[in-house]
Image: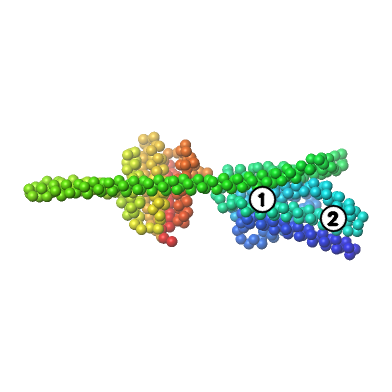
């Protein structure tokens, strides 16, 4: 009797050790892959609750139903306690469960072939029950240990939780992983089959085929890991491409700004060159007491000098250069341009960032107005600014026809070259985020308004 109690105690201890190790592995994976919101110990309590629920319903439901119910409960726990979008959380759970299941299947050949041989050696021994207990629990422990090493290797290379992934992209990961899990789960649950009221194990029917199973499971395990790694690299390359396009745009704007300065310098040099002629001419008119001619001549000089000044003055040289250039383009395309835009001369917004925001919004506004074919719709661009509570608020509205297409908070460009042209709004959002601001688009009938709020002082 005492020996039976010892065996039972030993069995429970090893089983509890295996379960605790499994909890730790899951916690490690979800912490690295997603990160917990708060109160990490609640995850372990939730896992204990899932295990106890499985034990409680074991006598009422089949093993297949218990596994599926536990999977649903784990998904709920992860959704509540972890960070990230719902689909990324779902992928994390499926990735975790698929990996554990594939590693379990890898060692079926050991459980069916090697374990019985070892147990036969102790068949007549008094320690048979204890050996059987050790073998069963060691089988679980080796699966969990390999799973831990696999997760540690995989999570160290993946940075998916740090990326902004839309629905369509994450489905690229979810669908293959769900497919592999479904096939592995189906194979796992049909190990025992009934034929003419007799129960057989697939291993006894297809023994030779089971020798290939570890290789297949290892290949599938590596494939879902490589798939996630390639996906992560794809996201990284997309970000690098966006950064490259942003740098090109910054360079282009700097070149344009340099061109404007050169044009202004050329005009100034021309005026300076003419000043000597003007002075000589005025001196000649003054010597001959031709006052009326002098007044007329001075008026012409004033008009000439006025061409060097911007029509729209905001108080900020960068804003003046961009807005006046776009106002001239709008005028050539017969678009009404209204501006009530004022900025401090010195603000903590970098000139190139301000230039990118204004250039992108005004370019989109001009192009939207240029596409309007209905003569009853007035082509109009209006821009305003407001400074309140250390924030700069920019409001630019324009006439528009058609609806703006969205996908996961991203605007889909209506142009043919969607990759390069769709980056404009993305660049604006990046800059707005940089200054702790807000970006918003409001669409009305025949009108689109973009609101940008930037923090002026830190």
Q: Identify which residue, 278 or 440, lies in the foreground.
A: 278
Q: Residue at x 77, y 45 (%)?
A: 189
**Residue occupying the far left of the picture:** 288
Q: Percent x, y for residue 215?
A: 74, 44
Residue 132, labelled with which disc?
2
Sort mark 1 into few (<14), some (14-19) or many (20+) by Cα contacts within 10 Å: many
> Which secondary structure, mark 2?
helix
> Of tags 1 and 2, which is closer to the observer?
2
Residue 326 sits in quarter: top left
Q: Which residue is drawn at 59% across and 48% down?
A: 232
Q: Percent x, y for residue 230?
A: 60, 45
Evaluate if marks 1 and 2 touch, with contact meaning CB atoms under 8 Å apart: no
Q: Is residue 347 above or below residue 230?
A: below
Q: Is residue 444 visible?
A: yes
Q: Can you identify the residue that label 1 sits on?
A: 93
Q: Residue at x 34, y 38 (%)?
A: 333
Q: Identify which residue, 347 or 56, lies in the foreground.
A: 347
Q: Is 270 left or right of 119, judged from the image as shown?
A: left
Image quarter in which the N terminus is found: bottom right
Q: Residue at x 40, y 45 (%)?
A: 252
Q: Is 341 left or right of 150, judged from the image as shown?
A: left
**Residue occupying the far right of the picture:** 124
Q: Identify which residue, 164 or 86, lies in the foreground.
A: 164
Residue 15, labelled with which disc?
none
């Amino acid at each position: 009797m005492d020996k039976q109690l010892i065996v039972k105690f030993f069995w429970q201890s090893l089983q509890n050790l295996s379960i605790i190790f499994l909890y730790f592995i899951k916690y490690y994976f979800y912490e690295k892959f997603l990160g917990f919101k708060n109160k990490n110990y609640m995850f372990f309590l939730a896992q204990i609750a899932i295990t106890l629920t499985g034990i409680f319903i074991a006598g009422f439901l089949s093993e297949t139903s218990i596994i599926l119910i536990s999977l649903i409960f784990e998904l709920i726990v992860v959704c509540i306690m972890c960070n990230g979008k719902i689909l990324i959380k779902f992928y994390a759970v499926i990735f975790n469960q698929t990996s554990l299941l594939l590693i379990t299947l890898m060692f079926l050949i050991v459980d069916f072939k090697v374990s019985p041989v070892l147990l036969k050696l102790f068949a007549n021994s008094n320690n048979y029950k204890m050996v059987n207990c050790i073998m069963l629990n060691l089988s679980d422990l080796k699966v969990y240990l390999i799973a831990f090493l696999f997760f540690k290797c995989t999570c160290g290379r993946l940075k998916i939780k740090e990326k902004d992934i839309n629905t369509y992209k994450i489905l690229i990961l979810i669908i293959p992983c769900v497919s592999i899990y479904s096939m592995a789960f189906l194979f796992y649950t049909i190990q025992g089959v009934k034929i003419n009221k007799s129960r057989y194990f697939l291993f006894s029917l297809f023994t030779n085929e089971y020798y290939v199973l570890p290789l297949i499971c290892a290949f599938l395990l590596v494939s879902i890991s490589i798939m996630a790694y390639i996906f992560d690299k794809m996201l990284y390359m997309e970000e690098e491409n966006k950064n490259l396009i942003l740098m090109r745009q910054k360079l282009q704007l700097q070149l344009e700004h340099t061109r404007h300065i050169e044009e202004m310098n050329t005009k100034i040099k021309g005026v300076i060159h003419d000043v000597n002629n003007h002075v000589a001419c005025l001196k000649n008119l003054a010597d001959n007491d031709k006052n009326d001619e002098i007044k007329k001549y001075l008026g012409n000089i004033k008009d000439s000098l006025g061409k060097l000044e911007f029509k729209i003055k905001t108080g900020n040289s960068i804003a003046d250069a961009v807005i006046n250039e776009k106002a001239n383009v709008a005028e050539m395309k017969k678009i009404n341009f209204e501006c009530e835009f004022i900025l401090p001369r010195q603000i903590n917004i970098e000139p190139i960032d301000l230039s990118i925001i204004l250039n992108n919004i005004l370019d989109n506004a001009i192009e939207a107005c240029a596409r309007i074919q209905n003569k009853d719709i007035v082509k109009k661009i209006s821009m305003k600014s407001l400074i309140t509570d250390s924030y700069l608020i920019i409001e630019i509205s324009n006439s528009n026809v058609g609806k703006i297409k969205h996908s996961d908070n991203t605007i889909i460009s209506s142009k043919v070259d969607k990759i390069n042209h769709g980056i404009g709004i993305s660049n604006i959002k990046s800059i707005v985020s940089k200054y702790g601001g807000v970006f918003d688009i409001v669409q009305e009938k025949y009108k689109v308004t973009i609101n940008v709020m930037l923090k002026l002082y830190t």
